[in-house]
Structures are given as structure tokens and as C-alpha cells.
Amino acid sequence: MQSTRQDLLRSPRLDSTMLLDTYAITFRGGKNAQGYHKAALMHVRIRFRGESQLGFDVFLPRNENDALSFIAKTKKKILLLGGGTDLLRDTEKIEGQCLVDISHLENLRHITREDDVEKVGALTRISDFNHSAVDNYEAFNQLAKGFGGRAISNMATVGGNICAASPAADLLPILLALDAVIVTRSLRQQRTTGILSFLLAPGKTGLRKDEIIAEVQFEAPARGKFCTFRKIGRRGSVFRATVSLSVFVHLNEVMEIKQARIAFNSLRDNLPRRANLIEQNLRGKRLESGAIQEVVSSLSKEYTVPSDINASSEYKLDAAEGLLEDQLCHIENLARGL
């Protein structure tokens, strides 16, 4: 059946800013949680001003079980749709695909704490970190402030940022520094995978065809635990970082480092990496200027940094050393209450 323009614009996650000439939606199914009583499958055909056309299917589940049942049984090529920020940049990506729109599944949007574990739902928006208990880790507040501007941070999701597995993703170094665990669900099972094992290569993760990311888990903020995040770029914090860094430090009562985890992103054209050698050198030392400078000077021994379109290798290494020293000094000040 032919739809009206308002029908199209009410459909969740379809970009209302597209310059359309003609459009048509064919529904197969009844009404669901977005206004359709049953899970609905529809075909969307869009003709842009000019000659180009775009055709794809959209599945609108009532709940998580509907979504898991559909992706387990369908033979269609699937794209899970949470926030849709990647599709805004690359609409051709959805040609011939079936978008499974899970953006309205509220059980996947949460920030909760259970005992000493923080749990963040896959559909949690980046902007949700602005006013949450997890902002006791400063890293999440800094992430939300500089994540592509307000419009993007209101759309972008935790699960989408992980699945994109981008060498420039801001969230990934934070999750690496917190040694996070990814919880995935299918009709058959729920499983957990460490973030290091889940990220396989740029654009590739360990998410199976019949799974969705349910949530991310990591140790909750507590006395003596600090996690920070900073990035630098040529055009300000809301753009792609030239270098980004997240630092997690757990201090005892006398300012000795019990645990340190440090993750850099954008130093190489691959996924973010932990600085294992620096982490080992920090353990057991007092967090003070002498130890900090000694550790920072060893960064060049651990990282071989190539030049790229954004910056020279020398600039990126200098920037990484400066960020690391700055963040360790900042954590020292936080611990001292300064």
C-alpha cells in the first residue's frame, strides 16, 4: 500500500532529512509497540531527487524476543539498528539489507549497579552518561561532552560504538581501560566475552549472526579507583581524535598503584591497544611526578607509531606522551583532593 509522508516520518529510525521525490512502504504484519499491534516487516523503497533509488526491508519487533527470533530464522542479510549514526553517513550500506530496528527496546537502555559491577545496556545513548552514577568515573563525562556534538551523542549507542569497532571510536579505549565484559544474547544462550577478545579487527567483532549485544559490564567506581579519558584533534573535541587515551588506576591508602590499565586509540590504523609494558612499570609505584615521568619516557619503546593523514608519527608520539603524563598527574590531584 502507498503511505503518506507522515507515515514515513513516523517510522522509527528512518531519516526524515532525506530529500525525497517519491517513497512507498509496504507493510506485512499488524501493529507493534511503535503503533503496530504485532511485529511488523515492511519494505521501504525511496527515490531521491534525481535518479538514485534505495530499497530495503525493516523489521519492527515488539520486544527483544521478537528480534532474537527473527534474526535466528531469517535468511536475509541483517543490520541491527540502534542509533543509526553510521547509516546517516553511509545510506548505501542498507541497500538490499534488512534493518532490524531495536531502537525502542527499553530493557536494553539502562545504567545500573549490582554489587560491585556496573551494567550498561547496549542501547544506552552516549548522552545518558551526562547524569548517571557511573560518572564517578570521569571518563564517561568527558566522553559525553566531546562525542560528535549533542545531536550525535543523543543518537549514538554503546552497542553501536562497540560493533563499529572503529580505530577512532572514543568509547573503546575506556572499555579497554576498565577491562569490560560484553554480554551477548541469542535465543539459545547468553554469553560473556572480554572486550579484548570481542574486538577482532577494524569493523569486525565476535558478535555472532543470531546475537545482539545486551549490555556491557565493568567494575563499579569505588574509593581509590579512577578512570579518565582525553582526546586531541585538529578541529576540536567533537571531531575524530588524532590521539585518544583512557587511564584506569586503583590506588591504596598510601598512593601506591595496585592496578593500572592504559589504552590508546588512533595511534595506529587498527583497534585500540593496551599499553602493557607501561602498566607493568606502574604497578607498586607511588603515583608522584618522578615515577610518572619515568614511565612516560618508556612509551616510545612500546609503540611504533606510523604517520597518517591526520598527523606525523613524531607528532602523535609526542601527543600520546603528553596526554599520558597529563592524565596521570590529573589522577594524582584527584586522589589528593586537589
Image (cartoon, rainbow, N blue to C red):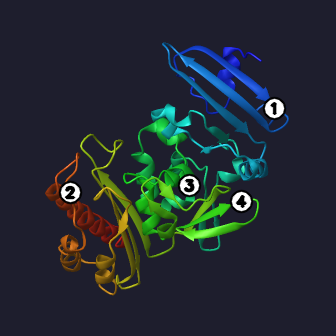
Residue 286, position as x, y percentages in the image: 29, 83
Residue that appears at 70% across and 47% down: 106
Residue that appears at 80% across and 39% down: 39
Q: CA distance from mark 4 to mark 1?
A: 24 Å
Q: Amino acid at mark 4?
A: Ser
Residue located beneath label 1 in the image: 36
Q: Amino acid at mark 2?
A: Lys
Q: Amino acid at mark 1?
A: Tyr
Q: Earlier in the sequence, mark 2 or mark 1?
A: 1
Residue that appears at 30% across and 64% down: 327
Residue located beneath label 3 in the image: 132
Q: Which mark is residue 316?
A: 2
Q: CA distance from mark 4 to mark 3?
A: 28 Å
Q: CA distance from mark 1 to mark 3?
A: 32 Å
Residue located beneath label 4 in the image: 186
**Comparing marks 2 and 4, which lies closer to the viewer?**
4
Q: Earlier in the sequence, mark 4 or mark 3?
A: 3
